[in-house]
Amino acid sequence: MDVKIANTTQSTLNKFPQKDKSNLIQILQAVQEKDDFLSPEAIGSISKHLRVSRSYIFGVATFYSQFKFNPPGRHSIRICLGTACHVQGGDFLLNVLTSELDITTGETTEDGKFDLDRVACLGCCALAPVVKIDNTIHSRMSVVKLKEILDGYE
Ligand code: FES
């Protein structure tokens, strides 16, 4: 996997001039689009290409929520923490998820099954609290319902 990442990162980097850090955001977006996330190896390659430190790149990338630093899981869980879902217990459901999966938002389970992230609103506030897994919206979630759904992915 590292070789694939290094190759795709290099082919992406070749489209941008060296030592020009004004392209950093575009480069990060292009690399993530190809690799699905920003690996430490990709950050290293970008660092060499632009002649800027890894910490500078991390500093910029972590400012934007669009950038991911872990590979996606086979199933993506998005917990809604918008106002309606928050009021209906979205935070509590997030705590259950982090405890059940042993990861926090932005991370992927060790077995690669699930990745977890929070979203501001899924556009179906009347059905709060809402959790989206892959392309399925699960409405009016409860802890029991959530655990049953997760068990369905075992
Ligand atoms: S706040 Fe959760 S769907 Fe709108």
Image (cartoon, helix red, strand yellow):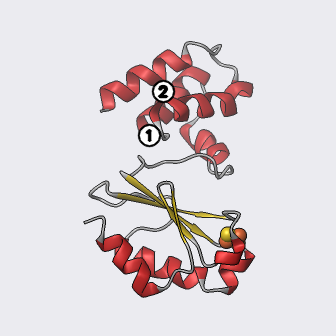
| Mark 2, other Cα within 10 Å: few <14 / some 14–19 / many ≥20 | some
Q: Which residue is mark 2?
A: 45
Q: Is residue 16 above or below residue 98?
A: above
Placement of the C terminus among the 4 image quadrants: bottom left
Give the amino acid type for the residue marked by disc 2 in the picture. Ser
Q: Is residue 53 above or below residue 107?
A: above
Q: Which quarter of the rendered image does ligand 1 occupy? A: bottom right
Q: Which residue is mark 1?
A: 39
The percent position of residue 64, horizontal first and vertical second, equals 68, 49
Provide the secondary structure element on which disc 1 rests: loop
Q: Residue at x 47, y 38 (%)?
A: 36
Q: Could you say which quadrant of the image residue 54 lies in?
A: top right
Q: Residue at x 53, y 35 (%)?
A: 32
- Viewer-nearest residue: 145 or 22: 145
Residue 86 at least partly seen: yes
Q: Residue at x 43, y 40 (%)?
A: 40
Would you say 110 lies left or right of 13 here? left
